[in-house]
Image (cartoon, grey):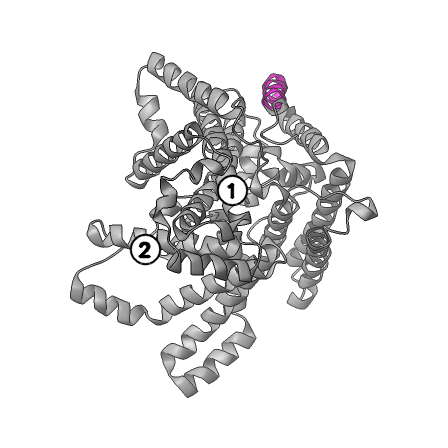
Amino acid sequence: MSFISPNFPIFAVAALILYFVAPQRARWCVMLASSYVFYWLLGGFFAIYAISFTIATVYASGLWAGYLRTHKARRSHRRIPLAACLTVNFGLLMFFKYGAPLLPSMGIMLIPGISFYTFQAAGYLVDIYKGKVEPERNPLKTALFLSFFPQLIQGPISRHSQIAGDLFAGHGWDWKRSRNGVQRIIWGYFLKFIVANRALPLVSAVFAGYRQYGGTVIFLSAFVSGVQLYADFSGGIDISLGVAEIFGIRLPENFRQPYFANSLMDFWRRWHMTLNAWLKDYLFYPLALSAPLGRLGRHTRKLLGNRAGKMLPTFLATFCVYFIVGIWHGIGVNLLVFALLNGSIITAALIMEPLLAGLRAKTGIDGSKDGSGRVFAILRTIALITLMRYIAGAESIEATLVMLRRTVLNIRLRELWNGTLLNLGMSFVDYAALVAGMVVLFIRDLAQERGTGYRDAINAARPAVQFVVLLAMLAIVTFFGIYSGSARSADFIYANY
């Protein structure tokens, strides 16, 4: 039972009712039971066994690591429970992700959301090792932290220090909190059904039959595929955050208007922010500040100068992070090239920063400030992200190169009006709904970029207006999305990560 299942709203309402009618001390237990039922309905008993194994190993290793730290054991000894638990659980993650083609023949199912709860578990253990949090003494509370159902499938990736207080507090029902949560849930479904699912036929048809189309249609489909991914992923996160908000739990934000980024680095700061924060704290800094890279940096300073010596560990750690991100997304060569190309561009930007700073000073054009310079920087970043979709979305490197060549040498602008677009599995109404949804998404993001949230504007209106707006959005999602005969049904892209 995924978020797009017709049964999910029924399940969520039932879980919320049981939570709020239960005694305050028992509410977190109700939430734990609901999370396990949800995961069983989604992935079956094998998924329950897998997450329970992770919970058990993390709980035991956390207690062990906490005991060694409080008793001032040697650092090498304190690393044993951390290393053992991380090795086992990341080994399982690799087995289920990269053994996916073999799993059905072995009678084993894919484990939904295994990446997200494994990352969350790893962060919790490292924080215990560093003394940032105390190990949870109650195994059932550890279980709830790792299995809380709104964030279980595609995040966001939370820290224990961020949400533990809310998880176990036993909140009562609150009207404003519930209203805000419902607004966010409806917005998430709007993004999923009106934007992401509507775009699917266009993107699928062009990326599968790229040799049939000119550069204009290919570039259009690549741009739409980026927006589709954004709407799909952020829409699912909005549903997660909305349900959690009704429970009284504030999950961390995962997106911050990425299509208003002024550089590739800025884009990744705004995209999947909880994963980026996890990678920065638990992978990038440990690598960049490690003893081997420190020694390398000192040798480099002697040979190439102070700046190069300082930056080399950063560059190498950056490449390692993006290499791992590429592997996490899949085993395809395209995904690895996509990740390493991002790392290369960001590294080049860091190297050239003194030169770029000088150019900004001379020209007065600064992409970080409002004005024409920022507009140019945003459009440049959108174009770059769109070109990156050629790599991430294509079936092979050869397909990527063919698509790029056709984009440059075989533009065929006429395909925008000669009926080609209507032969891609989408009608005029589908395109109209998709464009309208993308415009609404742009207006929402623009308002948030300027510091005005759409929920603030709705909540400032009279109750009758609020009701009409919510009813209108629900009607749009229902009739133009869920029950539209032409809208394709598809689960969330990141649901199986």
Q: Is residue 358 left or right of residue 120?
A: left
Going by the numbered disc 1, the residue's amino acid type is Gln
The correct choice, above or below, for 473 with respect to 374 in the image is above
> In the current view of this chain or complex, which residue is farthest to the bottom?
303
Residue 28 in picture, x, y percent from top left: 63, 29
**Residue flagged by tag 2: what amino acid is it?**
Arg
Residue on which the image places disc 1: 162
Secondary structure of the residue carrying tag 1 is helix
- Mark in the foreground, 1 or 2: 2
- In depth, the one of 300 and 60 nearer the eye is 300
The secondary structure that dominates the magenta segment is helix
Q: Using the rendered image of the protein, determine whether residue 251 is visible from the camera's viewpoint.
A: no
Residue drawn at x 42%, y 83% as measured from the top left: 301
Residue numbers of the magenta segment: 9-23
- Examine the rendered structure and indicate whether residue 11 appears above or below residue 318: above
Quadrant of the image containing the N terminus: top right
Tell me which label, 1 or 2, sits earlier in the chain. 1
State how far apart marks 1 and 2 are (Cα): 35 Å
Question: For mark 2, what is the residue?
Answer: 380
Residue 368's disc number? none
**Furthest residue in direction front, as rendered:** 418
Query: Residue at horizontal 22%, vertical 54%?
Result: 373
Q: Counting other residues with Cα less than 10 Å from the Cα at mark 1, is it few (<14), some (14-19), or many (20 or more)?
A: few
In the displayed structure, would residue 155 be above or below residue 89?
above
Query: Mark 2: which secondary structure?
Result: helix
Image location of residue 334, percent across then percent down: 56, 59
Residue 10: which quarter of the image? top right
Residue 140: image location, x then y, percent? 70, 36
Residue at 74 percent across and 45 percent down: it is 56
Q: Residues within 10 Å of mark 2 (few under 14, many from 20)?
A: some
